[in-house]
Amino acid sequence: MSVVEQYARAHIVTDEDVQVQEDRGAIPVILRYDPDRDPRAVRFGLPGAHEWTCDRALLEQGLRAPAGSGEIRVWPCGRVQAVVEFHSDHGVSVVQFETKSLLRFLRRTYMAAAEPVRG
């Protein structure tokens, strides 16, 4: 099966002044699905070598209604954005994505999982 990798732009959400957040701009995030490694998981690669693994079904659920498991929470934020919250021993990272980017990625993962085995 094929590995799916997609770059997405996201914003780190903080309690700081909104103007400061806007000046910071979007950060690049690598979305990755490797069905040979784990067919149920997707990975988020944030700058600074931070990588998080999330259940693919949890990500999909969280785009429609708040969902969470363990270190990760996902919920819709308005009609066009979604928030993914990553918890660790070092704190919490709250990252806002365009929902359409995450949906496009999920669609690609399901298409890759449906590919016939070649060999």
Image (cartoon, grey):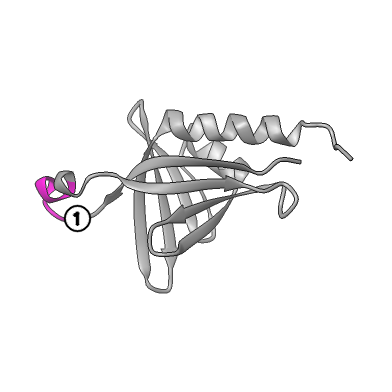
The quarter in which the C terminus is drawn is top right
Q: Let me know if residue 106 is in the magenta part.
A: no
**Which residue is the extreme one toward the front?**
119
What residue span does the magenta drawing correspond to? 16-21
Q: Name the image quarter holding the N terminus.
A: top right
Residue closer to the observer: 118 or 17 = 118
Q: Position of residue 30 (x, y in %)?
A: 48, 48
Packing grade of label 1 (10 A; few <14, some 14-19, many >=20) is: few
Q: Residue 28's x, y, as percent?
A: 37, 47
Q: Nearer the viewer, residue 4 or 64?
A: 4
- Count numbered badges in the picture: 1
| Residue ID at (41%, 53%) | 85
Give the percent coordinates (x, y) of residue 115. Answer: 78, 31
The outermost residue toward the right is: 119
Q: Is residue 95 above or below residue 116?
A: below
Image: 112 above or below 31: above
Q: Along the horizontal axis of the image, is 52 left or right of 15? A: right
- Amino acid identity at mark 1: Asp
Please report the residue visible at 12 percent of the width from the left and 51 percent of the height from the top.
20
* Residue designated by label 1: 15
Q: Is residue 57 left or right of residue 75?
A: right
Classify residue 108 by image quadrant: top right
Q: Is residue 69 left or right of residue 79?
A: right
